[in-house]
Image (cartoon, helix red, strand yellow):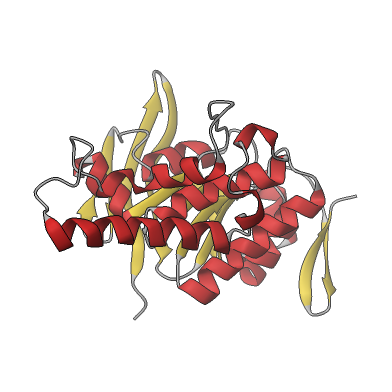
Amino acid sequence: MASNVFTITDLTFSYGENRVFDNLSLTVPEGAVTTLIGANGSGKTTLFNLMSKGLRPSSGTVLLRRGNVADLRLRDYAKLVAIVHQNNTAPFDLTVERLVAYGRFPHRARTGFVGGMVGSQARSCVQDSERMVNWAIEVCELSEVRTRTVASLSGGQRQRVWIAMALAQGSKVLLLDEPTTYLDVRFQLEILRLVRRLNEEFGMTIVMVLHDINQALRYSDHLIALAKGKVAGQGPPQDVVTPQLIEEVYGVSLDIALIDGRPFVLSV
């Protein structure tokens, strides 16, 4: 039986008097690329923030494997899960290499030093950090710009820098909140192909929020479709996305065609 990286049970959450979720239950499979889809206001961002410790549920549980996310210390959570939010900023003079190195923060002592370590143990810790930073920069194809400032890069390059910083944490789970927003189609595809590589080549479990249904169909193993705070469908993309689901989730009637054996939503 396949295991789950997140198990959400009887989740309730409200913003004041606005109830977003009422006894929501779902699972996110380990080792897969899972995408959250849904119309604006469906609860995608709220669910993402509940999984990433940005919010605490009113009731119910969000389990990361067997641990309750709400009870995990932030540093311990960061060793298990890396997060890239939709909007990120960095000081104008910060270099790519320096920003990526900030991803090692969860593995540093609270004092900023390699606490409690001496001699070869301390050197090994530093070497591990350098190795992870170099690996993340290489995987995200940033080697040629590693000494440049983040502010000098294109939007697509900056997004890869934030992903590289997340990868430097060494976590096996990556959460991405709308990673293709504000990017042109070329950079969108670069990011999505990187996501697939991280999953297929390095075995990372990835959960992301996307607006583009066809990108979700093409680059995901598992879809969770939300509508008005409830799960409208979840499972393999080709099984989940139907004209009926599109109508329920987005309130529009659209046809679905097969192109090279893959479903494609005709949105024009």
Please indicate whether residue 240 sits to the left or right of residue 259 in the image. left
x and y percentages locating residue 24 in the rendered image: 39, 47
x and y percentages locating residue 107 in the rendered image: 26, 50
Please indicate whether residue 202 sits to the left or right of residue 256 in the image. left
Q: Residue at x 48, y 40 (%)?
A: 99
Farthest residue in the front direction?
A: 119
Q: Residue at x 19, y 43 (%)?
A: 109
**Image quadrant of residue 191?**
bottom right
**Image quadrant of residue 143?**
bottom right
Pick whichever, 123 or 200, lies toward us. Answer: 123
Please indicate whether residue 235 sits to the left or right of residue 257 in the image. left
Q: Residue at x 36, y 53 (%)?
A: 81
Above or below residue 175? Residue 5 is below
x and y percentages locating residue 2 in the rendered image: 37, 77
Pick whichever, 207 or 102, lies toward us. Answer: 102
Q: Which residue is drawn at 34% across and 81% down?
A: 1
**Image quadrant of residue 112?**
top left
Numbered-mark total:
0
x and y percentages locating residue 228 in the rendered image: 55, 38
